[in-house]
Amino acid sequence: MATEAATNAAIEVRNVSRWYGDVVAVNDISFSVGPGITGLLGPNGAGKSTLLHMISGFLRPSAGAVEVLGEPSWRNTEIFRRVGLVPEREAIYPFLGARDFALASARLHGLADPHEAARRAVALVELEDAQDRAMGGYSKGMRQRAKIAAALVHDPDVLILDEPFNGTDPRQRLQLMEMLRRRAAEGRTILFSSHILEEVERLAENVLVVVNGRLAASGDFRQIRHLMTDRPHTFELRSSDNRALAAALVGLPHVAAIEISDGRMDVRTSDFGAFTAAIGRAVRDSGVTLRELRPADESLESVFSYLVGS
Amino acid sequence: MTRTLLMLTAHQLLGQRRAIVIALLALIPIVITLLYRLAGDTEGAYGFTVDMVGGFVFTLLLPIGALVFGTAALGSEVEDGTIVYLLARPIARWRIVVAKAVVASLATMVLTVPATLIMVLIALEGLGSDSLWLAAVVAGIAGSIVYSTLFVGLSTITGRALIIGLVYVFVWEAFITSLFDGTRWISVRQYVFGISDALTSAPEVTASLDGSQALIASAIVVAVSLLVGVRFLKRFEIGEQS
Amino acid sequence: MTTPEPAPSGAIYDLGYQGYEGPRLGRLYALWSLYLLSLRNAFGIGRGALPKVLAFGLVVFAFTPAVVTLIVGAVVPADDFEIFAPRDYYGIIQFILVIFVAAIASDLVGNDRRSRTLALYFSRPIERDDYALAKIAALSSSLLALTVLPQVVMFAGNALGAANGLDWMRDNVDDVPRFVASGLILCVTFGAVGILVASYAERRAFALISVVAIFFVSLTVVGIIISEIDSDQVRWSLFLSPLHVIDGSTAYIFDAIPQVDEFSRNGEPINQVAWADFPGYIWPLASLAWAALASAIVVRRFRGSI
């Protein structure tokens, strides 16, 4: 079975839906996750946590099948011998220190040398300095790392992290990302969720984009990024003479619309690349001074709404 | 593995203010008994002891202690979200439920039984006890186990186990059972009385179930609570934060 | 909140926010809103199914004696039947009342703390004292549904069931002000004590159990002390037990404190309130003192917290 899992995807999600009463949280999603780092990207409330809970076997899919390491995950506690889970909730045992928390986790896993496992896990998240202080007094970032340490004690093949970077400062985030990359390089499977595009962009090789409970995009991150930038784009410009510049720009083939208001001008183009290549020449030819040029609506939500075609 | 479960739970249950409050409650009978003995009249000492044990320890202290610890053992982990650190481990669910029930029972026992024993010994000092102390201790231990396990099981079914447990103890057991004799079979309080009655010859102790009936009923309640607890914990779902 | 003045030069973007210029309804209105919201919450209105079931389940329990009386009254054509007398009503359902108080008090106080809305309330034009009093008022008035309301139903039902309803009402009309007055005193006392205990518990679960414990432990302990300890001085301990005090208050208002010329210890039940032999008016006063003291402590509590 272990060999079979090694060749197949570690996580297999097939036509999975989950609804709570009338509310559909996850709608007919299929994907598979193999070794490496996969980012589950989506705005808050998109269904990321529901999906991760189903993968971890804590939620029964209303329809479809979830398999982890070749076995159905629902109610299957045995998968946790090879799976580590970092939940989103900040809950911890406030009376334990990070070391004892990891130690308890190691013992619950029935590891042969729990002390060594706990020491190693705490070192992985660089929490040694605070490991004997009660976690009740930890900052958010420290709690987050303590949770990750507890999930790493048994050196799992599959690591599932729900919003792992919440509350971490930039330095800790870099350190955690580095640690995750090293594990991925060893051929392990890592699936993490985030609502922040930049986190996913920096860490994930593969990406799954979830919006409104549906899978909006999946695959190689650069590919998706490219697809995203091919959509109609709006630029915001300020110049010494907006109307003259508008007259020049409207002649370009890929400029779809121009709107002028209060000293600024919004230009919509169908081709991101061609427009950025042509704008320089157009400005120079019209003799106008360009003061500001920036892409508008770069927010994650607008990217998503484009991806789901609404 | 089991030891870790037990330690974690013990830490959660006993490391908080509620344990102190229950311990203080358990001291009340001792204080009253000291007052009683200081007042000097020992004619009704048996009646007094039975009143204290039956009227306070078995009907208030024990169920309240068991409610606090039994519903918190699993319930507070569910409420706080720490339950995921137990469920995301390769541990059979029954181990979790049993460990929680054991610790809740022990916590209830530790905080109620010794105080009760001391109280009985003070109350009957120099009077001969007719094994009242034994009845109080054994029935107290049995009651701790049955009540605590019952409430651990209940807490796997609903997040409002505490209020339902309160209604059970203070409406069903205290009120309905006193009206309808047939309900004595579904009243843990009556089991506790039955067990204590069987262990003492003091005529002040009376019960509506005899000792063996009470023991059998207790065993059934414990077994059913554990089975239900395991079953519901297996089906337990952790969803989005609600 | 200050009104953003559009400056002639500068870079404040108008995002559409506006200062509120209209009339403000003031502190009383805020107090009233919080009171209404708490009252709705008490019965689970605007919340999930379980709070509704629990609250209305307890209400149904509290109505049981009244309903039993009505049914028996309808079946048995006797003129002067009385299964549950109005003066005994609150005593019979006191277990249910205490659990209701515990459940609602822990909800009213605990939910705001747990969801951290307490700080939000206090950053609004609502005074901390108002918050405390609104919670007590909401709990006390929700209790009316379990106390005075079933009495009204029972009274009306009895009048309708009697052979001559008008005669019956003339004979028993005295009961109405009595059960209203004693019911009001009970509601206020229970409400204040319930919120008091709940406001000191860190967790909602612990608030629930603490409220129940305060009422029943004091009832039982004082009961045992009085019946077992051979001293007249122990009668003062009755004032430490709210259920005893309420019992005395209701009995006094119904003019029903029994005459106890002789009482027996050990064995036969005695009416402890009667045995204590305080002047009757002291009981309603003691109830109101409990209510006032508890309210004062609750107000202080919320002045200090968060």
Image: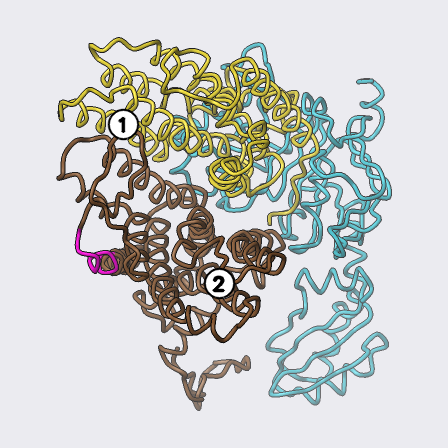
Chain colours: A cyan, B yellow, C brown
Quick one: B95 or B38, which is closer to the camera?
B38
Residue C97: image location, x then y, percent: 44, 52
For the record, the magenta segment spans C278-286
Is A231 on the left-hand or right-hand side of B68? right
In the rendered image, the quadrant that contains the N terminus of chain C is bottom left
**Which circle marks residue C145 in the picture?**
2
Residue C197: image location, x then y, percent: 34, 49
Whole-angstrom CA distance, mark 2 to mark 1, is 37 Å
Residue B208: image location, x then y, percent: 51, 24
Dot 1 falls on which chain?
Answer: B
Residue B158: image location, x then y, percent: 60, 40
Q: Residues within 10 Å of mark 2 (few under 14, many from 20)?
A: some
| Mark 2: secondary structure | loop
Quick one: B200 or C297, which is closer to the camera?
B200
Residue A135 seen in the current view: yes
Q: Is residue A184 above or below residue C41?
A: above
The quadrant holding residue B129 is: top left
Dot 2 falls on which chain?
Answer: C
In the rendered image, the quadrant that contains the C terminus of chain C is bottom left
Residue ID at (50%, 21%): B145
